[in-house]
Image: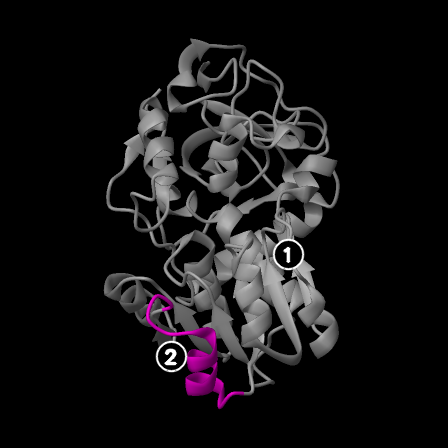
Amino acid sequence: MQARVIDEFGEPDVFETREIETPEPGEGEVRISVAASSVNPVDYKIRRGDLPPFAPDFPAVIGCDVAGTVDAVGDGVTEFEAGDEVYGMPGGVTGNPGALAEYMIADADAIAPAPESISLAEAAALPVVALTAWEMLIDRAELDSEEENDVLVYGGSGGVGHIGVQIASAADAHVVATGSTEEKRGIAEELGAEATVDYTEQSVEEYVADHTGGEGFDVVFDPIGDDHLQTSFEAVRPYGRVLTTESSSTQDVSAMHLNALSLDVVLVILPILRDAWHDRLGHELREIAGMVDDGDLEPLVDEQRHGFSEAEEAHRRLEEGDALGKIVLENDL
């Protein structure tokens, strides 16, 4: 089969197109004929060599997100058969080859039927960001419609943030989202945010006063991390919860003690890294697909589409922040 392969860490131009052996599904696995993938920060960080513990062996096929059609099933697989359209996040890290190839192997428990109301290309934009937002807001914060929660979403038009806005809104939370431009704030409002904040113009103290009467947010949803973690501690109420995906920098967490805060750090690809807990991914992907088909969730996809042959440009654009929504790659190999 044809695949986009990297033999070393480096800039986007390390990608090469190469003929490699077509994989066969083992017990409990399926082979997916790949229709599309999308680019996430974890993908370009792996390519650059920023995350050695996550990197697959060279020559490596990367790309965590996948959507496509089941092509073959291994022994013991009963939930899927050839021809089923599926999506998920089954590889692209450690010993699990990724999606930038004609075929990809997936543990059957780690994938789910693709949403029926959107295309496979659109479905490919969802797994990493939607699973991340789901784990943060549903698994950790346990948002539900029976409680009123004030939720602050950083980057409400970003990859994880735009999904977070929609999941929190579907749980009847009062959602306030941040955005640096009028366009980005407008998108967050279209997706369900009741209010938005221009964090370049307002201080944390000001927007906490405006939207919570100075009490602080019940939940701060921070898919950006690092220095944003400090503003999260300032924005959350006493006994509140901060959710983040990035905690690799050194931060002063004394505010957690002073206000009895909870901090949850989410690493959504942990089941793939550890080769465990795959069933939780499959379950959550089914819930997410249900939200999509019920009209409660939609992926924000960048207008410019790329083929797998243009992975270099897609990676470059995401690294430079030159996209509004997820960058989707469609299989043209």
Frontmost of labels 2 and 1 is 1
Residue bearing the label numbered 1: 251
| Vertical placement of residue 22 versus 43, above or below | above
In the displayed structure image, the side of residue 290 where residue 282 appears, left or right: right
From the image, which quarter does the C terminus lie in? top left
| Vertical placement of residue 122 versus 82, above or below | below
User: Which region of the structure is painted magenta?
Assistant: 199-214
Residue bearing the label numbered 2: 194
Which residue sits at x=66%, y=27%? 74
**Is residue 35 located in the magenta-colored stretch of the structure?**
no
Q: CA distance from mark 2 to mark 1?
A: 30 Å
Q: Position of residue 212 (x, y in %)?
A: 49, 86
> Is residue 166 something that shows in the picture?
yes
- Crowdedness near tag 2: few (<14), some (14–19) or many (≥20) residues, C-alpha within 10 Å: some
Which one is nearer the viewer's eye here, 134 or 161? Answer: 161
Which one is nearer the viewer's eye here, 158 or 79? Answer: 158
Amino acid type of the residue that numbered disc 1 sits on in the rendered structure: Gln
